[in-house]
């Protein structure tokens, strides 16, 4: 099973990378950028074929390694 | 208009971050991980309301700043 995991900062958590991108876009002449937030996308290719099992493995991977659940949230999407 | 931009390494380009995650998952006892690739997700909130114009702005932002099109590909998705 293949999954795409999206890890993003929770709302309200300061995102300096996103702010840096917003400033850089401004310097390049792009106007009207209200906000920019940067997150991570992780593509997992798991050997497990059972959909329910594979999804539960992916979720555990997020909780234990991929996301810092204190400040980040994650979303798992089958590909 | 709000967009999600996904920037990933082109197939064949070595992904050390993804490899590091794969090893870390192995150390945590997760088996059967065929591959891991890491990419970036950028959430853009643009003031432009015209769908066609906003999408073309987002595309230009990717080409000029967000993605290194030599080694990365990008995908834009309206939210």
Image: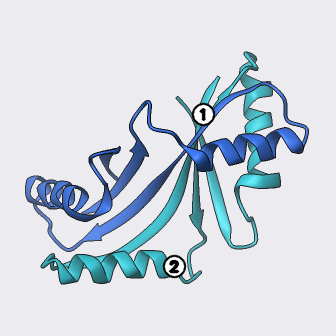
Chain colours: A blue, B cyan
Q: Considering the image in quadrants, where does the N terminus of chain A appear?
A: bottom left
**Residue B42, above or below B11:** above
- Dot 1 or dot 2, earlier in sequence: 1
Badge 2 sits on which subunit?
B
Towards the viewer: B55 or A50: B55
Binning the other alpha carbons within 10 Å of mark 2 as few (below 14), some (14 to 19) or many (20 upward) gives some
Residue situated furthest right in the rendering: A29
Secondary structure beneath label 1: strand
Query: Is B61 on the left or on the right of A45, as rendered?
Result: right
Residue B40 is situated, as x and y percent measured from the top left of the image, at 54, 56
- Front residue of this view, candidates A42 and A65: A65
- Horizontal side of B53 relative to A22 (left or right) equals right
Circle 1 packing at 10 Å, graded few (<14), some (14-19), many (20+), is some
The image quadrant of residue A59 is bottom left
Task: Determine the residue positioned at 24% across, 76% down.
Answer: B25
Which residue occupies the foreground of this view, B79 or B46? B46
Position of residue B49 in the picture relative to residue B79 (left or right)? right
Residue wearing tag 2: B15
User: Could you tell me which residue is drawn at 91 percent across and 38 percent down?
Assistant: A29
The label number, if any, that marks residue A39 in the structure image: none
Residue depicted at 45% across the width and 56% down the height: A41
At mark 2, the secondary structure is loop
Residue that mark 1 sits on? B3
x, y percent for residue B65 = 78, 54
Q: Position of residue A33 (x, y in %)?
A: 74, 29
Which sits in the foreground, A74 or A1?
A74
């Amino acid at each position: 099973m293949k999954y795409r995991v999206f890890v993003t900062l929770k709302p309200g958590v300061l995102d300096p990378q996103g702010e840096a991108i917003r400033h850089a876009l401004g310097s390049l002449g792009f106007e009207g950028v209200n906000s920019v937030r940067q997150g991570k996308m992780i593509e997992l290719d798991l050997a497990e074929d059972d959909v329910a099992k594979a999804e539960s493995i992916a979720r555990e991977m997020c909780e234990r390694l991929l996301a810092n659940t204190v400040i980040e949230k994650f979303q798992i999407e089958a590909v």
